[in-house]
Amino acid sequence: MSLLCKARGATVTICSIQTQDLREAFCYADIIITATGSPHLIHGDLLPSNRSLVIVDAGVSHEPPYIRGDVDIDSVRDKCILITPPTGAVGPVTIAALAQNLFDAFMLQDKLSRENFLEQNQINAQTHNV
């Protein structure tokens, strides 16, 4: 994700769960993307009050009976303009990307183009419906 952001001209700061001062790292952030799997690692006290943030929480941890994200949503809610919920937000996008990559790999393996594959299946469908 950091490479994609850099390729679009963004200044990227990479932190980990060992980063000593997350507050300092977040003070100039516009977007925070987290995926550590550490429940409630990011809370409102770490975020600047003078910025409106977008937070993408891709971290998941299981604390039965709960599934928690990396972000304590209740404590950051007032400091964000957008935030993904801990479940049901990033997962479907990941699954869609995985399905697309699997399809593309299949096409490359059989040296087919996407257009040829779709055209071939459309012809087969028309033949069977006659």
Image (spheres, helix red, strand yellow):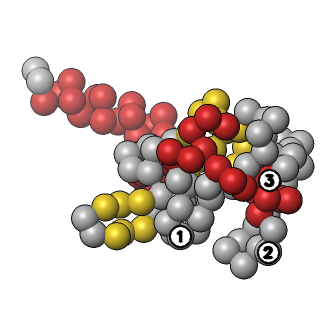
| Of pointers 1 and 2, the one earlier in the residue sequence | 2
* Residue 119 showing in the rendered view: yes
Q: Position of residue 94 (x, y in %)?
A: 47, 52
Secondary structure found at label 2: loop
Name the quadrant of the N terminus: bottom right
The residue at 10%/21% (across/down) is: 130
Q: Position of residue 96 (x, y in %)?
A: 43, 46
**Would you say 13 lies left or right of 102 here?**
right
* Residue 103 showing in the rendered view: no
The residue at 60%/44% (across/down) is: 76
**What amino acid is labelled 2 in the image?**
Gln
Most distant residue in the bottom direction: 18
Disc 1 marks which residue?
Answer: 38
Bin the neighbour count of mark 2 within 10 Å (Cα to Cα): few under 14, some 14-19, many 20 and up.
few
**What amino acid is labelled 3 in the image?**
Phe
Disc 2 marks which residue?
Answer: 20
Q: Position of residue 29 (x, y in %)?
A: 81, 46
**Would you say 86 lies left or right of 5 here?**
left
Disc 3 marks which residue?
Answer: 26
Most distant residue in the top direction: 130
Bin the neighbour count of mark 3 within 10 Å (Cα to Cα): few under 14, some 14-19, many 20 and up.
some
**What amino acid is labelled 1 in the image?**
Ser
| Of pointers 2 and 3, the one earlier in the residue sequence | 2
The residue at 21%/30% (across/down) is: 125
User: Distance from label 3 to label 1 (Cα)?
Assistant: 17 Å
Residues under numbered marks 1 and 2 in contact, where contact means CB atoms less than 8 Å apart = no
Q: Residue 18 is drawn in which quadrant?
A: bottom right
